Amino acid sequence: MSTREVSKAWEAVIGLEVHVELATATKLFCSCANEFGAEPNTNVCPVCLGLPGSLPVLNERVVEFALRLGEAFEFSVPAQSIFHRKNYFYPDMPKDYQVSQYDAPICVDGTLIVDGTAIGIERAHMEEDTGKSLHVGGSGRIHEADHSLVDYNRAGVPLMEIVSRPEMHSAEQARGYVSALRGVLGVIGVSDVKMEEGSMRVDANVSIRPVGSDELRTRVEVKNMNSLRSLGRAIDYEIARQIEMYETDERIVQETRHWDEDAGVTHGMRTKEGSEDYRYFPEPDLVPVAPDDSMRARARASIPELPAARRVRLVSEWGIADHEAAVLLAEPGLADYAEGAVAAGASGHDATNWSVGAVLGYLNENALAPQGLLLRPDGLAELIGLVSDGSLNRKLATDVLDEALRDGKRPKQIVEARGLAQVSDEGAVGALVDDVFAQNSDAVADWRGGDDKLKKKKRGFLMGEVIKASKGSADTAVLNRLLDEKLNG
Amino acid sequence: MAPERITRADVEHVAHLARLALTEPEIEELTGQLGDILGYAAQVSALDLTEVPPTAHPLPLVNVFRPDEARPGVDRDEVLAQAPATENNRFRVPRILGEARG
Amino acid sequence: MSAATRNGETAAEIAAAVRSGTRSAREVTDAYLGRIGAGEEAVHAFNLVTADAARARADEIDAMIADGHDPGPLAGVPIALKDNLCTRGVATTCSSRILAGWEPPYTATVVERVVAAGAVPLGKTNLDEFAMGSSTENSAFGPTRNPRDPSRVPGGSSGGSAAAVAAEFAPLALGSDTGGSIRQPAAFCGVVGVKPTYGTVSRYGLIAFASSLDQVGPFANTVTDAALLLDAIAGPDPLDSTSIRAEWNPVISAVDEGIEGLRVGVVTELLDGIDADVAARLSEAVDVLRAGGAKVGDASVPAAIHGLAAYYLIAPAEASSNLARYDGVRYGLRVDGVDVADMNAKTRGAGFGAEVKRRIMLGTYALSAGYYDAYYGQAQRVRTLVIRDFDAAYRDFDVLLTPTTPTTAFEFGDKTGDPLSMYLSDVCTIPTNLAGHPAISVPFGTGANGMPVGVQVLAPALGERAMFRAARALELGAP
Ligand SMILES: [Zn+2]
C-alpha cells in the first residue's frame, strides 16, 4: 500500500456565471408580456413560439438595462455588439436555437467590489430565456419521466448573463459576490433579483490548485443552486471533492455537475459527445447594437448611488460601523428605509440600530421587503424621538415598534392607547424605590454589609424589582441615579 | 484551409447535429454529393482574404428597437390546434433523454 | 401601350377599370378563376386555390366602390401568392410534407399590404420545397410545368408564381428570391420578375430560407405592373428589424422616364459559359439600350465568379438554422420516436425532401466546429469582395446588364441527378443577393428552342428607379 501523500495546502479558484431575468414589461424580441405565473402558453405570439416566418425585434428597454449594467460595473461598452445564434435542439426552445451574444457582447471588462476586493467581470450579454418543461411520470424527474409538457410563456424572456473572472477563492467570497451583485442589480432597477424564484440563477466554475501557484486547472461547472446558502454549500462540497480526487491521484474531468440540495452532493450530468458543437453564427434577423452617446448618457443619468459608494458615505455621515452599513445595504430597500427615518429627524446611528435590529428581524420573520412595511420611515423616526426624549425606554420602545410594524399604527398612538409612557418623574420613581426598599429590607441590609460583589448583585436585584413594579415604564436613567442616592444616603 | 474528403462518419456526425434520420442510401449519396459541393465551394477557402472583413449582412443598419409595450399575442387554442400533441394546454413531447441543456 | 401582354389586360388596366366602376372586381376574379379551372391541371401552378375567399374579397372590393371608397392602387387585381408567405387560417406549406396542413395564426406583412391595396388573392403557388431549387422539381406536391412548353421546367424556386402569371392565371404574383428564385423562373416563363433591394420589402411572414439573402418581390406581365406591385409592398415594417427605415420612393413614376444618358455596364465576368442564343439576345438588348440613348460599356465585377461558391455556403448555413424549428413539437408533421431526439430526427427525416436535407447537411457542416473559418467565415469575406466590386462598378455605371440565366428553360429531369449543375444555373442571379442589391429580369425574345430569354438589369441598393427605366426600355424594344 502506498502511503497517502500529506495533504498540501490547496486554494480554490472560483468563477461565477449569473443569469438575471430583466424586469421589463415585454419579452426580448416580441411584445408578449414578461410576467410570472400566467396560465400556460398564454403569453405567446408567432415570434416567441418560433413560428415559420416570424422575426425578432429587439426590446429597447433591454438595451437600456444592459447599458445601466455597463455603468454600474464600469464595463467598457464596445462601439458595436451583435447577436449570434447558438444552435442546438431542445423542445423548450421554439426555434431550436437560442439568440444570444457570443464574441461581441454589449459589456466587457467590468468590476464589482466585494468586501473591499475588486472582482473582475469578464462580460455581460443579452440573451433569451427558454420555455419550461413539466415532466410527467417518474416522480417528475426529467430522465425517468414518461413524457414532458412544454409551456412557452418564459420563452424569449430577456436575460443578462454576467460572467465573472475566476478570481474568487472561497465559498464565502462567492456568496459575497452574488450578494453584492444582487445589491447593485436591485438598486439600478433592472431585475427583481430573487434567487429563490429563479429570477437570478448562479452557476459556479470551480477548480483548485496548490497554494502559491497561479495555474488554472481543470474546472467543473456546478449548476442548480437556488439560494445563497446552497451556492455556498455546493462550492464547499466541490472544493472538498476535488481535493480528495487530487490527493488520491484521480483525474478531474471537465464536466457539468448538478447540485443535489437534499443529498448535499454534486452529481455529474450525462453529456453526449458532440453535443457541445453549437455552430454559432451572427443572427441575420437582427442588426448590430451601437450604443451612441445619448443612449450612454441616459443610462448614466438613471444610475442612482451604488452600494459601495453609499456604504462609504453612510459610515462617514452617520458614524456607524462599516459592518452595520453592510447589513443595511445587504437587504434591498433597508438603507432607503433608514435614510427615510433620518430625513424625518432621526439620527443615523439610531436609525441604523433599529433598522438592522428589530426592523430587519421583522422583515425576515415575515418574508417582507422594506417597501412593504406598514410602518413608514417617519414612524420609525417618531419612535426614535420617543426614546431620545425619554418618553420610552429601550424595552418599551421594542414592544411599541413590534406593534407598529404589525398594524401600522403610529408609535405615539400606541403609547397613548396603552398608557405606556415612561415614568421619569423623580417623585414617582422615588416612591417606587421606597416601596421596594420597604418590601425587601433584607436585600437592602445585605447590600449595606456586603462586599463589592454582593453589593453589585443586590443592587441589580433591587433595580429589577423597581422596574417590575413600574411594569417596565420607569426611566432607567432616573432610576439608576435615585437608587444610588437612596442606597448610599 | 480545405478539409479532407467527406467520409461516411462525417455525414453521420453532421446528421446527428442536424437531427436528421437518414436512410442507408441517403447516407451513401450524401457522402459523395457533399464532397463534390464542398470541393466546389472550397474555391473560397483557397482565397487569401485575411485583410477583408466579413459581411454578415448587406445592410448597414444599426439600433433597430421596439418600445417595451405589451401587446396581445395569439390565441392559445389557435396555436395548440396546430400542434401534433397537447396535454393540459401544453405541448406534449416524448421523454427528454440524455443531453444536458446548453 | 403594354408590349408584353398577350390578352391585352394588365394589372394597371384592371385596377383602373375597377376603380372607375367600369368593371367589377367579381367579374375580373371570376374570369381568372375560370382560366385557372381550364388550365391548372396541365400547369400545376397552385398548391391551393382559394376560390371562395377570392370571390368574397372581390365582393368586398365592389361594395367599397359602391360606397364611394377607393380600394387602392391594386383594386380588384387578382394575385397569386407563393406558398411560403403566411396567410392566417389558410394552409401554408412551403411545398413540404413537414408543413402540410399547417394553418398559420398570422398573415405576412406583404400579403396584408397587397390586400390593403385592393388586390384579390387567388391562392398559394407551388415552389421548390422551402424555396430550395431552380425548377420546382423539389416540391413535395409535384412539379409545376412551364406554360410555354409543358415538357420544360418553369424554373424555381418561385416556379408556381412565374407560371401563374405566364399562364394568365393571375396578372400579378408574389415570389421570393434568395439566389434568383424570382428572376430565373421569370426568365424561363417569359414574364417580368423583380428582386428588390434587401430591406425594401418586409420579410415578416415570409418563411425563411436564408435570412440575409431572402427578399419578396413581384411577378407581372409588364414592367409597369411590376412597378405597381412593388410600390404596394415596399416600405418600412416595424416587425422586420432588417427593413429599411426610410419611406419608399415609388418607382411607378420613373418607369416611362426613358434612358437618355443612362450609363449601362455589361458585366463581362458573367458572360462565360452563357449559351450562344442567350448571348445573342443580350447583345441585341445592348443595341436596344443604345438606341434609347443609353451609354453602354463593359463593366467588371471580378468577385462575381466566386459568388456562387460563397452563396452555396452562406445560404445552406443560414437555412440549417432556420429549418431547425421543424422538429415535430409545435406544428406540422410528427413521426413518433422513443424519446424527443428520436422523434425530432424521424420527423425531419420523413418530412424533408432530398434537396432540403442536402442543404441542411451542407450548412450544418459549414458551421460546425473546425470548419467555420474555412467555409462560412470565408464566404462572408467573399461577400465583402462582391460588394466592393459592385461599388466600384457603380462608380462608372448607373445600372449593369447580364443575362438572367445561362440557358433557357431546361427539360424535366435534366439536372435533378447533379445538384451542382443545378446550382450553376444561378450564377448570374446570385451576386446581387450577396450584395443586397435590386435586379429585374425582363423577357427579351426567345432562344434556339423557342423558349423565352430573360435579360437582367442590376442596380445599386435603392437604385430601383434607374433599374425600372432600363427594364421598360428593354420591354419596349424586345423582339
Ligand atoms: Zn411573443
Image: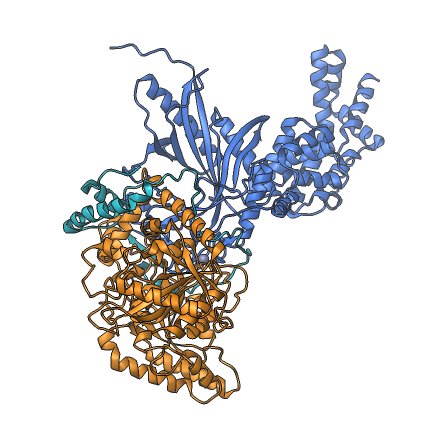
Chain colours: A blue, B cyan, C orange
Ligand 1: image quarter: bottom left
x and y, in percent, of residue A111 in the image = 56, 32
The picture places residue A429, in percent across and down from the top left corner, at 80, 30
Residue B72 percent location from the top left of the image:
49, 63
Nearer-the-camera pick, C89 or A230: C89
Q: Nearer the viewer, residue A166 or C70?
A: C70
Residue sitting farthest toward the bottom: C22
Q: Does residue C330 appear left or right of residue C466 in this picture?
A: left
Above/below status of C374 relative to C458: above
Q: Is residue C295 left or right of residue B34?
A: right
Would you place residue C77 above or below residue A18 in this image? below
Q: Nearer the viewer, residue A104 or C160?
A: C160
Q: Where does the image place residue C330, in percent across and percent down from the top left?
A: 33, 58
Kindly indicate the quadrant of the structure image that contains residue A211: top left
Give the residue drawn at x 77%, y 38%: A385
- Residue A286: tell me if it is visible: no
Taking the image as drawn, is residue C443 in sight?
Answer: yes
Q: Quadrant of residue A478?
A: top right
- Image quadrant in which the C terminus of chain A is located: top right
Q: In the rendered view of the protein, which quadrant contains the N terminus of chain A?
A: top left
Q: How many marks?
A: 0
Viewer-proximal residue among A312 and C220: C220
Q: Residue at x 46, y 30 (%)?
A: A15
